[in-house]
Amino acid sequence: MLVLMLVAAATLRLCLVAGAQQLCRIHTVRTGKVFHVSQQIQGDHLYFSSGTPRLIKHPCKKNIALYLGRQIFFTRDNFKSSLLPLSLPTSIKVGIPEVTSAHIAGSVLLLVVNQKVYVYDYEANSWNASIGIEHPVSHISGDNCCYSGHPFCVDISNSVFAYLHGDQISQTHVYFSNTRGYTFQKFAYERQAELVGSLGGVFHFHSLSQVGLLLIDQGKAMFSYSEHPLNRSLGLPFDYNGTLDILITPGQKGILIFWFEKSLLVSGNAGQLVYPVPMDEEPRISYSSVSEANVTIHNIAANQNELAVLTRENSLYYGSLGILPSSLIKFSGQNIWSQEAAVMFTDVGQVEILTPLPDPMFPAFDFQRCPMNVQEILMDPQLQVDVCKVELLQGEFDNRMYSIDMNSKLQLTALMIPRPGRSPVPLAMVSNPHSLGLQVAIYEDGYTYDGNTKHRLNISLRQQHHWGRANPNFTSSIKKPTVSTITLDVANKEISCVDLKPLTALISVGCDQGKKIVIQNKISACSNGILDPVGLQDNYSYIIEKEAYDPNFRGQMSREDLVVNYPYEKLGCPRLVYYNTPWRPVVELWREGKFQEVTKAEFVLLEVNGLFTYTYSLTAQMALCRSQPQNWTTILESAGDKRPFAWDRENYISCHDPDNDAPLRWPDVPYQILGGPTANKVIFDQRNGIYVFFLSIVDPYYSYCHLETTFSVYVYGALPPSIIPTTVTIIPLIMAMLLSVWSAYMIPKLLHTEKGLRLKEFWMNLCRRLRNLCPCFQGRR
Ligand SMILES: *[C@@H]1O[C@H](CO)[C@@H](O)[C@H](O)[C@H]1NC(C)=O
Ligand SMILES: *[C@@H]1O[C@H](CO)[C@@H](O)[C@H](O)[C@H]1NC(C)=O
Ligand SMILES: *[C@@H]1O[C@H](CO)[C@@H](O)[C@H](O)[C@H]1NC(C)=O
Ligand SMILES: *[C@@H]1O[C@H](CO)[C@@H](O)[C@H](O)[C@H]1NC(C)=O
Ligand SMILES: *[C@@H]1O[C@H](CO)[C@@H](O)[C@H](O)[C@H]1NC(C)=O
Ligand SMILES: *[C@@H]1O[C@H](CO)[C@@H](O)[C@H](O)[C@H]1NC(C)=O
Ligand SMILES: *[C@@H]1O[C@H](CO)[C@@H](O)[C@H](O)[C@H]1NC(C)=O
Ligand SMILES: *[C@@H]1O[C@H](CO)[C@@H](O)[C@H](O)[C@H]1NC(C)=O
């Protein structure tokens, strides 16, 4: 009987709060009790340390949320069913488990319980204690990036900090994890020992490519940043009253919200500037801060563009989080506040107050939900809200992720339709003007259509460095890949523009994965008939004599000849190079299968089998080096055994760099860098044969990608010294003798070895000179 009644009650119960202003319609979620009858809470019952509850929503997965209060609830269906409180398995013995901080990182839930971090993988339903934290911690911080396909984005979701709030900064232990909290290591902050004050938080501001430490000292707080150029001084100080909770809003825009009962502050630029949020009460009453408005905040919620604040005075304040600060507007309600109530956004303009309700009959809790539609509430004439001056703001780039590499440009377009007679001002902003060096230009191109003027907005983004305006005091290391956001909004937007959200895109300033380099192959050894493509494909191998190679790349002769199998599938037919002509490969940049340009960037070469029978046309001095240039010997020494071919854009230091102060002690060493400003070329020794080269672009300012490739050349035309005829007159004689012998017996057998190829080619040279005498060999091809 009881069961039947409960099944009936399992549908939603709707009821209006009697007498209340119609702010929201309260209903209770009560489901699945029948199936939970046998369920009991297993393990230790978790609770949140603060007197007021918090609600954490997963920024990427709409239905995943965590409620922290006297009980802790974890939902995977956005509280659409009754839930058992979350508990820690008894096998993890922690005493009375008090949670001080929580974070959702990708598919795991991180909880700080009794000063230790625990990981709950909600997909696998497994608990693990974090590894690597040796000192007590109270808080955990992290961010989520929702473009899960991008490696940079995955890194963002995987990185987490753990720290002890309120500890002395100079000696506190901060831990960092790039495994979503499973393992931590000590985080080294460069000037930590010099910093004065207690720790208010540690955050990775991805939109700024900075780690920020919040210092609290004598009622003021300020950020210290890790990276150039912000590491030179502290951020601007702001009032720090009580203990501020810090919320990073989703979307990597660098918007932070700081709050406690009596204070509410916002920063739009990752803490560089923090200001109190003004609050409007009635159309003409406006307060500059929470303390002035004399309200007590119960809790807050934020999404990418909106902020909602629930106060103990049964009011809800609502505002937008735009590029420019804006005030919150008050909606009065009745009975919307209770000690266990928590506010959350379910969608744009959709706020909901959630309260867990215990059930005396069952261990699972029900949820009282009170949803409200902000746009509808704002239409109340009593609020006297101005209509939004923009009818439409639209852009394909909204909520997308882009990549921008060095020397490339990104063009975004948007459409804005103002309300007739109004002329809104569009605003665009990038979150990371320092290290990114992106510049934004808006072209407005108004045309009239249907009586409205539409505005097309063109936004062009590029790296500042390549606009020739980079100031090293302003741009950070442009060698490092980074991330930024671009936000397009309207200046002084009315609060009624609820549905007119700013357009935001995430931009990874880094390698454009579609780029690759190709070595031009205009004259191949096969098309010229010097090498036989059929023979090369048929498991072709050649021998490198021991005098010509060093497997350790140190230029010393080896003990044995080397048999090399030619990887035709990978390398194709070798390019043809005449031994006596200084040579430089032509490197082409391709993007997504399309030719872009012949690169002028600096690059280096290394023969992969250790052949050292080549050198360079320039010496360090001839290349006008100011300092000692790097070479493969010095690079391989410093790289150790880690990577064999470790010369790249990250470790390359130009000898022309004015900041490079290594003295030029050996001006006569060969200069091993090709391309760029010098006319340096490769000079081959008098030796015919296949060379397989590894090529790496080392110019750090060409692309963020590690552009490298492997290709082969066939060096020909060097007459083997031992068989060079002494006088031209005896050639016909030798020819006649050798021809008869080789063509009959040896050539067919040797054709598949390098010696064979060399000999074949020797004959071809002779043939070219004495064409009428040897038609026979050409016929064998
Ligand atoms: C979590 O703990 C279990 C044992 O309790 C272990 O088998 C598993 O490897 C751990 N997972 C990770 C990611 O450390
Ligand atoms: C800031 O960072 C740069 C680059 O890491 C470093 O060279 C510089 O010394 C730092 N400045 C300060 C004041 O720590
Ligand atoms: C912090 O407290 C001081 C003194 O009580 C007050 O003047 C100030 O406005 C408060 N600041 C904020 C941001 O609440
Ligand atoms: C603030 O509000 C409380 C009650 O809500 C009241 O007692 C107090 O006088 C108010 N303070 C100010 C400065 O208005
Ligand atoms: C804006 O971009 C569009 C398409 O990319 C182009 O046709 C138009 O000429 C551009 N307008 C301006 C003012 O640059
Ligand atoms: C960078 O800052 C230093 C000291 O603040 C100053 O001497 C130098 O001129 C600045 N450089 C540029 C390019 O502005
Ligand atoms: C290719 O040649 C190598 C040695 O020269 C030999 O070990 C290998 O089995 C051959 N592979 C084929 C497919 O003939
Ligand atoms: C490499 O450079 C070092 C000095 O940096 C020099 O002593 C050495 O001879 C160079 N090696 C070659 C092969 O040029």
Image (spheres, grey):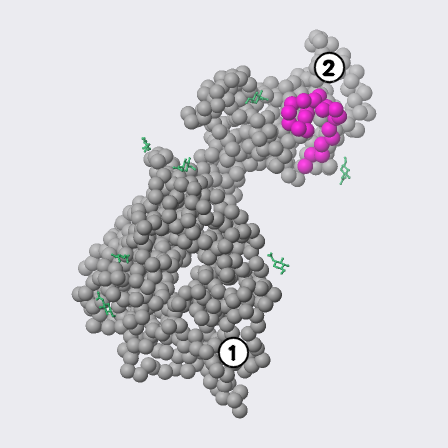
Q: Is residue 732 magenta?
A: no
Main SS of the magenta part reads loop
Picture coordinates of residue 582 (x, y %)? 56, 20
Report whether 367 appears left or right of 377.
Answer: right
Say the numbered circle drawn on residue 363.
1
Whether the residue carrying mark 1 lies under 8 Å from ligand 1 is answered with no
Q: Position of residue 348 (x, y in %)?
A: 36, 65
**Residue tagged 2:** 722
- Asked if disc 2 is less than 8 Å from ligand 7, the answer is no
Residue at horizontal 53 percent and vertical 22 percent from the top: 671
Viewed as shown, does residue 636 lie left or right of 503? right
The part of the image, by quadrant, that contains residue 472 is top left
Q: Would you say residue 537 is visible in this rendering?
A: yes
Pinpoint residue 595: horizontal percent, then vertical percent.
Answer: 49, 39
570 or 286: which is nearer to us?
286
- Circle 1 SS class: strand
Which image quadrant: the C terminus? Answer: top right
Residue type for callout 2:
Ser
Q: Report x, y in % for residue 694.
A: 60, 32
**Mark 2–mark 1 distance (CA, rounded to whole Å):** 95 Å
The vertical placement of 13 against 679, above or below, is below
Q: Nearer the viewer, residue 242 or 289?
A: 242
Q: Which residues are magenta?
A: 546-567
Question: Would residue 147 be visible to someone looking at this image?
Answer: no
- Numbered badge on residue 501: none
Name the secondary structure under disc 2.
Answer: helix
At a point 33% along the width and 75% down the height, the residue shown is 336
Q: Is residue 566 magenta?
A: yes
Q: Are marks 2 and 1 in contact (CB under 8 Å)?
A: no
